[in-house]
Amino acid sequence: MQVFRIALRLIRNSWPLFAIYVLALSAMGMVMGTSVGGSVPSDEAYQQESPRAAVIDRDGSEVSQALEAFVRSESTYIELEDSTYALQDAAARDVASYVLVIPEGWGEDMLAAAREGTDAPALETIVSYSGADGTLMDERVRGWAQELYALAAASDAPASDLISWLGDVQSSGVEVSRAEPEEAGVPTDYLVYVQFATYPLFGGIAAIVSQGLASLRDPDVRRRLGASSVSDGSFRCQTGMAIGFCGVLVWALNGALGFMVYRDALAGVSMGAVLLIQMALLALALVGTGFGFLLWQLGVSHEVAHAVANIASMVLTFLAGTWVSIDQMGPAIESIARLTPGYWCVQGIVRVYEAPRITLDVAADVAACAGVTALFAVAVVSVALALGRVRDREAA
């Protein structure tokens, strides 16, 4: 095991590469995960924020008054003068998130339109630009008007009865009960961390393997080993073991760092979920190891190895959906992403994240994604071995 011991010594002496590609990039993933935040505690009470709303009722009918009462009940109501200056000032200074102006005759026109089957009369609104609560309030108002329209279209009852029925409909809510999940889900910050781990597990391993073990390609080293009892087959076998050990070491370090940092968040998470995620990452680490082996076989320079490893990692992580969710990209980009190992690795991780609990079906899906990812490693290693044989023939 002479070659393997030399390789381990070279790996040990490559600690700056480990510091950059494992510790630094893993720390960057932690920062990104922290910025996203973890899961919301189950005992945290939900607090609804009411939008600031105002109503200018120029109709004064029974229907318009009912609509104004609805807006008051659903918002923090603000009294506003019915004047052009007041409306402009409210919009400019963001006094109210939502201002509803009910035109004259709107109540009668609404009932008439419903019974004649024509379009409902429009309402005038001023929605704040500074947030979404005004838009949500506008959707509630439109929903109220649509429900009134439907009741009026189905009945010739007077407005007072329609308003009463509408109030009964809105007050009759759906009974909701809270169901605790059988297993705690994977926290979002840990999800971001493991997704970003695709960068060091591909480019980091490739750079460390191609440069950390570069001395084994040195002709003088090969000649000295050739003069000893180490055969060519033993040299290749021990070198392959060292390269594989380097890849597994980076994967283990990244996984251990994630578990140490997120151990509290992962306390209630099923160990099976964590193991499935790590299985998907291990498959990608094998691809990174194979890619590093390919660069090692090509004998590229220090600068070229780092440039190729980082550029390839950026492309791979982008197509995997690490930076932007793959669902937000076009079908053409998604089709291209399916041809990369990072896509299948992240799909397996997301499958665990979205699963309410770990079942055999979930495990099978993740194993399938990891298997597809591992096939990329087989393909890359095959190309590297073929190139190695060609170089050996040329050297002979």
Image (cartoon, helix red, strand yellow):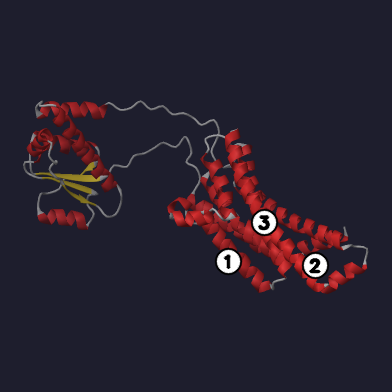
Q: Position of residue 168 (x, y in %)?
A: 22, 26
Residue closest to the eye, 158 or 286: 286
The residue under label 3 is 379
- Disc ID at residue 104: none
Q: Nearer the viewer, residue 166 or 395?
A: 395
Callout 2: 10 Å neighbours few (<14), some, many (20+)? some
- Label 3 sits on what residue type? Ala
Mark 3, residues whose alpha carbon is within 10 Å: few (<14), some, or many (≥20)?
A: few
Q: Residues within 10 Å of mark 1 (few under 14, many from 20)?
A: few
Give the x, y percent position of residue 27.
59, 57
> Picture quarter containing residue 304?
bottom right
Dot 1 falls on a residue whose secondary structure is: helix
Q: Residue at x 19, y 29 (%)?
A: 166
Residue ID for mark 1: 311
- The correct choice, above or below, for 131 with respect to 73 in the image is below
Quarter occupied by the C terminus: bottom right
* Residue 78 shows up from this direction: no
Which badge, 1 or 3, is on the more N-terminal residue?
1
For the residue marked with disc 1, what is the amino acid? Answer: Ile
Kindly tell me whether residue 71 is visible in this rendering: yes
Residue at mark 1 to residue at mark 3: CA–CA distance: 20 Å
Mark 3: secondary structure: helix
What amino acid is found at the position of numbered circle 2 in the picture?
Leu
Residue named by callout 2: 216
Quadrant in which the N terminus is drawn: bottom right
